[in-house]
Amino acid sequence: MNTLRQDSLAGIVVFLVALPLCLGIAQASGLPPFVGLLTGIIGGLVVTALSPSRFAVSGPAAGLVTIVVAAIESLGSFSVFLMALVLAGVLQLLFGILRAGRFISLVPASVIKGMLAAIGILLIMQQIPVALGSAEETGLVDIVKGNATFSLSAIAAGGLLVLWLWGSPLIRRVKSLRWIPGPLIAVLLGCVTTLLLTHFAPQQLAALPRITLPAFGSLGDLLGELESPAWSAWRNPSVWMVAVTLAL
């Protein structure tokens, strides 16, 4: 209770950053944005309640996008992938019981940094067409043909400018702004731009890719949107391969 005020402020900041990240990473993984929203909520509540760590932030990991996309494509369906996810959770529990975390010291730091750098490059390459004005991640053809949208490029440039500015000494000198993450300001800039375009240039807004969430009229509608794991898929060796990869 002594740190409730500080924890509440930190929780709000993490929520505002994690919410669009959950939606974006789900969409980048080829899944409905609702899946990212739901897993972000459950992961945040469950992991925080069960973790013995004093300092922990649970949330979406952009590094898993490439693994999830490849896994769903190889397994053939989202429900089979969910089964692999369940098995990965069981394996991680076993790793914890066996105290296997100490073996992480055997993995060179250069391997981890190289893997993360490679994943980062792949994600950046996917977003370059969108930043240049195409509504699709693979829309370089649209850009070459001159079908790119100026509003997309302007928003991308504005977001990058905010990120650069927020890391500059000019902002770092202002103590009241130091605790606000730059990505949060970039997301707010995109939201404000969308609101302005809605009123002043709706034709430009139509070209922007939008994230839409389903509307639920009742709890039954929400439960009907959920998909169960394919429990019988545990006999598939490919499912175990994905499960081990995710767990590690």
Image: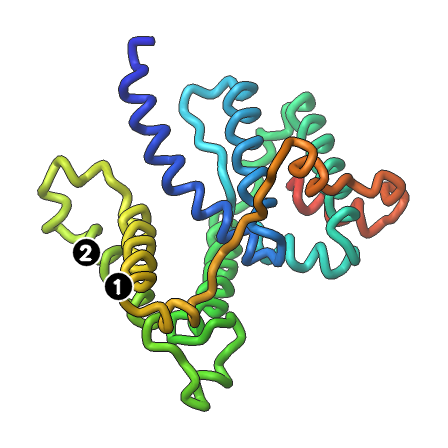
Quadrant where the N terminus is found in the figure: top left
Amino acid at circle 1: Gly
Residue at left 55%, top 56%?
27
Answer few, some or many: residues within 10 Å of disc 1's Cα (few below 14, many 20 plus, some between 14 and 19). some
Instruction: Tell me the element at label 1.
Output: helix
Cα–Cα span, label 2 and label 1: 10 Å
Q: Is residue 56 visible?
A: yes
User: Marks 2 and 1: which is nearer the front?
Assistant: 1
Answer few, some or many: residues within 10 Å of disc 2's Cα (few below 14, many 20 plus, some between 14 and 19). some
Amino acid at circle 2: Leu
Q: Residue 57, position in %: x, y?
A: 44, 32
- Image height of 25 relative to 181, above or below: below
What residue does disc 2 label? 165
For the residue pair 135 and 5, the one nearer the viewer reads as 135
Q: Residue 75, position in %: x, y?
A: 78, 55
Instruction: Tell me the element at label 2.
Output: helix
Quadrant where the C terminus is found in the figure: top right
- Image height of 46 relative to 217, above or below: above
- Image height of 163 relative to 130, above or below: above
Q: Is residue 111 visible?
A: no
The dot on residue 65 is none
Whichever of labels 2 and 1 marks the residue nearer the N terminus, that label is 1
What residue does disc 1 label? 158
For the residue pair 176 and 195, the one nearer the viewer reads as 195
The quarter of the displayed image where residue 69 is located: bottom right
